[in-house]
């Protein structure tokens, strides 16, 4: 599979996906392009230094669907078959989601369906949760919704802050995302397995 990663920030999950693919000669995906809605995203420099083509377009002044069409064009130019959203802080248009339906994954730093949206770790602490974690799911039109492909759980410690939790959740994210993406794209080569995995998703 040819994967395009979309980021808006640091890009540590993008790096985890990339390094995992390079470590395993049998990895069923390769990162072929990294794109961002923020030309200043630190992860773009990292990807470029690793020899991965990058693109960045500012969304300022564009309608959501117009901007997303530019992103789709870039991804298609790179021959992308699957998208991994990794800290991509843009809501997606219905057009984009439909176009990539069943081929676009997202990572969210909570045990979905709990704590969707922003300020996740503060919400976890405010709710007095004893555990949290991260979730990889297929992207559907609803934010942080869609069939769950994998989760990793971590304990919440007394004295945790949103920052300490974020750091530990990211350790788990970096393990989980490459594994789930590899499983997902391998299953996609096998129609029966794909149907099993994305059951519940209207394709
Ligand atoms: C991750 O915690 C991810 O779950 C959330 O945004 C963060 C991105 O971090 N959606 P990074 O850019 O991958 O370092």
Image: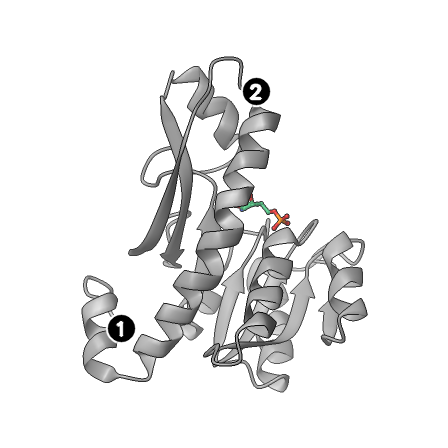
Q: Is residue 202 left or right of residue 93?
A: left
> Residue 25 or 111: which is nearer the viewer?
25
The residue positioned 69% from the left and 58% from the top of the image is 37
> Residue 124 or 92: which is nearer the viewer?
124
Q: Is residue 138 left or right of residue 197?
A: right
The extreme top residue here reads: 159
Q: Residues within 10 Å of mark 2 (few under 14, many from 20)?
A: some
Q: Quadrant of residue 19?
A: bottom right
Looking at mark 2, is its residue's CB closer than 8 Å to ligand 1?
no
Question: Secondary structure under badge 1?
Answer: loop
The residue positioned 73% from the left and 66% from the top of the image is 47
Residue 132, percent from left and from top: 40, 32
Residue 174, percent from left and from top: 53, 52
Q: Residues within 10 Å of mark 1 (few under 14, many from 20)?
A: few
Residue 139, percent from left and from top: 40, 59
The residue positioned 79% from the left and 58% from the top of the image is 39
Q: Is residue 176 left or right of residue 25?
A: left
The residue positioned 58% from the left and 71% from the top of the image is 23
Question: Secondary structure under badge 2?
Answer: loop
Image quadrant in which the C terminus is located: bottom left
How much space separates mark 1 and mark 2, taking CA atoms? 40 Å
Q: Quadrant of residue 193?
A: bottom left
Tag on residue 161? 2
Q: Earlier in the sequence, mark 1 or mark 2?
A: 2
Above or below, 109 against 37 in this view is above
Residue 102 seen in this snapshot: no
Q: Which residue is mark 1?
A: 203
Residue 20, percent from left and from top: 56, 66
Above or below, 108 against 115 in this view is below
């Amino acid at each position: 599979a040819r994967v395009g990663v979309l980021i808006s920030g640091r890009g540590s999950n993008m790096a985890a996906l990339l390094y995992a693919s390079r470590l395993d000669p049998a990895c069923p995906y390769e990162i072929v392009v990294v794109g961002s809605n923020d030309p200043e995203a630190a992860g773009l420099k990292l990807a470029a230094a690793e020899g991965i083509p990058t693109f960045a377009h500012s969304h300022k002044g564009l309608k959501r669907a117009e901007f997303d069409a530019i992103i789709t064009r870039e991804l298609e130019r790179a021959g992308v078959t699957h998208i991994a959203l990794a800290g991509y802080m843009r809501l997606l248009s219905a057009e984009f989601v439909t176009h990539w339906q069943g081929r676009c994954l997202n990572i969210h730093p909570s045990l979905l369906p709990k704590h969707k949206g922003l300020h996740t770790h503060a919400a976890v602490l405010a709710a007095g949760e004893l555990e949290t974690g991260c979730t990889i799911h297929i992207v559907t039109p609803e934010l942080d919704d869609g069939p769950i492909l994998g989760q990793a759980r971590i304990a919440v410690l007394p004295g945790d802050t949103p920052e300490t939790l974020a750091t530990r959740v990211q350790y788990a994210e970096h393990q989980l995302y490459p594994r789930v993406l590899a499983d997902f794209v391998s299953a996609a080569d096998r129609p029966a397995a794909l149907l099993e995995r994305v059951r519940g998703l209207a394709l």
